[in-house]
Amino acid sequence: MKKIITFMLVLLTSICISAQNPGNGGRAQNGRREFSPELYMKALNEFVAREAKLTEAESAKFCPLLNEMFAKQHQIMGQQRELMMKSWKNVNHNEDEYENIVTKLAALEVESKKVEQTYYKKFHTVLSWKKIFAVRIALQRFQVEALNRFQPGQGRGNNMNRSFNNQQPNRNFNNNQQRWNNGWNNNNNNNRK
């Protein structure tokens, strides 16, 4: 989950830094569609529901909780980002000031993990622990696929909106995941004998 938070922090930071051009029909100056956080979260929710095999009823109850958790973690990431930006502007910190910065950043990471722990208990009011585990796996898979789609020069371009709209899975990742699952199932079956 820490990787997902880090990925979202990087992604949201890049969104904030990038130039906005609202009068261009959602298109950036290079003709590509601009990133939409709403579209990203919609794609995330659909991916998690599909990969974790959530029913429509489970998905309807679970996705708002997931979005709520990410919103709270996003606020914490905003505090981290603000602290980092202030630190980067003033590079003449002494050792004590750097210690203070690092301690505050670590405390914010712990706070984010506490939010996550709290929400796992809330998730359990809607889903079984087995499905919550499947959700964790799906979130990690989504992150890998999103990073693969975002990498320039990979034949897919770096337009995340187009990639998420097409919902084309990364075949290599799925093949490797299938091989891993088969190995896992074979090992479990061998251990049962």
Image (cartoon, rainbow, N blue to C red):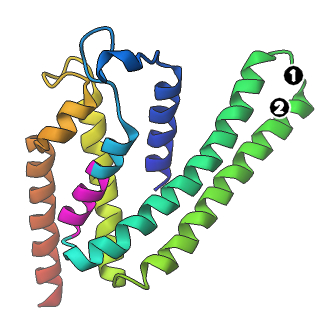
Residues rendered magenta in the picture? 43-52
Q: In x, y percent, where is residue 54?
A: 22, 73
- Give the quadrant of residue 20: top left
Q: Residue at x 32, y 15 (%)?
A: 24
The image shows residue 158, relative to residue 106, as above or below, that is above
Which three-letter amino acid code belongs to the residue tagged 1?
Answer: His
| In magenta segment, residue 184 | no
Looking at the rendered structure, the number of numbered marks drawn on it comes to 2
Q: Residue at x 8, y 50 (%)?
A: 175
**Magenta: main secondary structure:** helix
Q: 10 Å neighbourhood of mark 2: few (<14), some, or many (≥20)? A: some
Of the pair 158 and 173, the residue shown nearer to us: 158
Which three-letter amino acid code belongs to the residue tagged 2?
Answer: Tyr
Q: Residue at x 21, y 40 (%)?
A: 164
Q: Earlier in the sequence, mark 2 or mark 1?
A: 1
The image shows residue 28, relative to residue 133, as above or below, that is above
Q: In x, y percent, where is residue 163?
A: 18, 35
Residue denoted by label 1: 93
Q: Is disc 1 placed on a helix, strand or loop?
A: loop
Q: Is disc 2 placed on a helix, strand or loop?
A: helix
Q: Is residue 172 left or right of residue 116?
A: left
Q: Is residue 58 left or right of residue 174?
A: right
Tell me whether the residue at label 2 lies in contact with that at label 1, contact meaning CB atoms closer than 8 angstroms: yes
Gap between marks 2 and 1 measured at Cα: 6 Å
- Give the quadrant of residue 159: top left
Give the number of the disc on residue 98: 2
Please identify the residue farthest to the bottom as the structure is shown.
193
Q: In x, y percent, where is residue 177?
A: 15, 55
| In magenta segment, residue 48 | yes
Q: Residue at x 10, y 42 (%)?
A: 168
